[in-house]
Amino acid sequence: MQLLGGTQEVGTISGVVTMDALPPVSVLEVTTDQEVCGEAVQDESIIADDGGHVGNAVVRVTGLPWPTEVNAPSIDNVQCRFEPHVQIARTGSQLLVTSQDDTLHSTHSYDDRNRTDFNIAMPFSGLEVNRPLRRPGVVRIECDSHSWMRGWVVVSNDFGIVTGLDGTFTIERVPAGVHELTVWHERLSAQPQTITVVAGEVTEVTFNLVQS
């Protein structure tokens, strides 16, 4: 749950992100450092329950500013996967990169032009490094040491939220009026929607994703 707005008239946006055709559950083969990583890891590129509710989708409200106080973004190397897999961060914030693994990770960030933002060697657990997220766009994070590892940071001037594993999201205290909502997903897509938020009421919205 996220809170926005000040003393002006506000309402709530409540929604769900879904898909029709569920993909089979797949795993990715671990080819190195199996003593730390295990023999396989789940493919997290599409996370959906049996009802087709999609997690790890980023829903944004166009033009809606971020609240004054938000948690700083962070990404952790945990058993040779990135945690969280998907997140949204305010433009200009500092991303904290950490590792819990006693193996060499090389956390490599690419911007939406496929240019390197940073490439950090993480040779042991407990290391913490901050890196700035200077420009808006979708940042892809990989590990040069483990080819299956991938994470995403949506860097945005507009406020947004990541759907839970049940595909739902709630944004409270949104100023009353007309707003455009967009959704980003690493493999799926949906058209933007325009909604009207009414003061003191809940506006419901559903996004149905399709293959990009």
Image: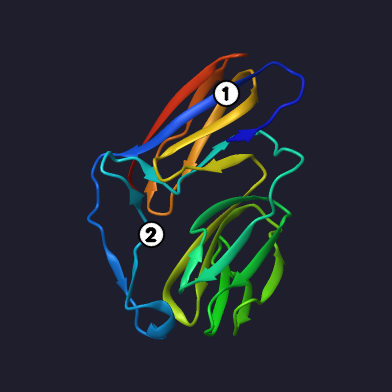
Please state the horizontal and vertical placement of residue 12, each as a whole percent of the image: 57, 23
Instruction: Report which residue position mark 2 lands on.
Output: 44
Reading the chain from its start, which is encountered first: label 1 or label 2? 1
Is residue 108 found left or right of 47 in the rendered image? right
Instruction: Report which residue position mark 1 lands on.
Output: 12
In this view, the residue in front, 92 or 9, is 9
Q: Quadrant of the N terminus?
A: top right
Query: Residue 159 lies in what quarter of the image?
Result: top right
Q: Amino acid at mark 2?
A: Glu
Alpha carbon distance from label 1 to label 2: 29 Å
Give above or below for 32 relative to 160.
below
Mark 1, residues whose alpha carbon is within 10 Å: few (<14), some, or many (≥20)? many
Is residue 102 found left or right of 120 in the rendered image? left
User: Decide: marks 1, 2 in contact (CB < 8 A)?
Assistant: no
Q: Which residue is painted at 63% across and 60% down in the image?
A: 74
Give the structural element (helix, strand or loop) at label 1: strand
The mark found on residue 52 in the picture is: none
Give the structural element (helix, strand or loop) at label 2: loop
In this view, the residue in front, 211 or 144, is 144
Mark 2, residues whose alpha carbon is within 10 Å: few (<14), some, or many (≥20)? many
Is residue 41 found left or right of 58 in the rendered image? left
Q: Amino acid at mark 1?
A: Thr
Q: Which residue is painted at 38% across and 58% down in the image?
A: 45
